Amino acid sequence: MTPVDVDVLRQVNMALTKNLDFCQSGDGSKAWSEVLGLREDFKSHLSWVMGLGRLSETFSRHAIPNFLVRVLHPLSQSLRVNLLLGMLPDCFLEVRALTEQLARAFQADLKFTKEASFTSKLSRLDVREPSLYKLTGETDNSVLPLLSELGHGWVRMDQPLTGMGASLPVSAASTTYSPRDVPELLRLTSAVKRFRELLAKTMSQWASKIEKKDSHSATDDDS
């Protein structure tokens, strides 16, 4: 390990230690609480999906369960780490990604119910509705204001999240929080809280559609 590597690790460790203390007290604790709550949301929603049974069919056919394990799980973990590292631009970017991909998965399941796999649903959706911004607006009327809030200096809303032409904020290194960071931490608190509310509402709507579909299937089987 080079002296530069040692210095970087030392800085990261110092930032983690100080930021953890900051995030466990005062205004910083509000953001920390919401981010930890998002991890609990993931566990709760995944537990409900696992309880549906027929896991192979559920995960092969539906986009929402795959959103939970392929998007929400890693990004909620990353959000927690980046918050502790003081990388607020990355945190806002992750909330935007979560919001867009939740809308994408929900709309795919909603609009292409007859498709046999979640990948074919997503492919058809991307061809038919390539604008994630439009898809998010169709999902719930709370989404566009949330995305607008996320765009205040952190994420350019006129650019795609990924791909050619993307213009994304990237934190250069870990930083240590100070009182001047509280306004942005409170903005992040609000953004994560609003996403959690959107996630709960979307999962409830998705669950009702799944249960209705299963009810129809059972009726068809009986006849």
Image: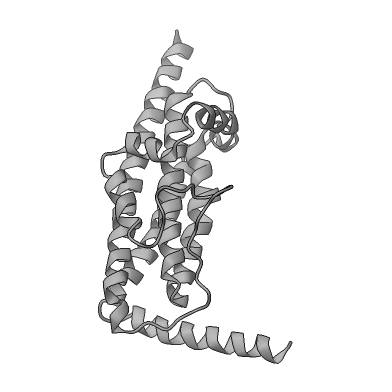
Quadrant holding the C terminus: top left
Report x, y in % for residue 31.
32, 69
Q: Is residue 43 above or below residue 114?
A: below
Q: Quadrant of the N terminus?
A: bottom right
**Could you say where residue 41 lies in the image, as x and y percent from the top left?**
39, 55
Q: Would residue 116 be found to the left or right of residue 154 on screen? A: right
At 35% from the left and 71% from the top, the residue drawn is 32
Residue 193 drawn above or below residue 101: below
Q: How many marks?
A: 0
x then y, percent, for residue 51: 47, 42
Write down the quadrant of residue 115 in the picture.
Answer: top right
Q: Residue at x 34, y 59 (%)?
A: 192
Tell me where residue 202 appears, x and y as whole percent.
35, 40
- Which one is nearer the viewer's eye here, 159 or 66? 159
Give the residue displayed 40% in from the left and 18% down from the top: 216
Question: Residue 58 versus residue 8: which sits nearer the camera?
Answer: 8
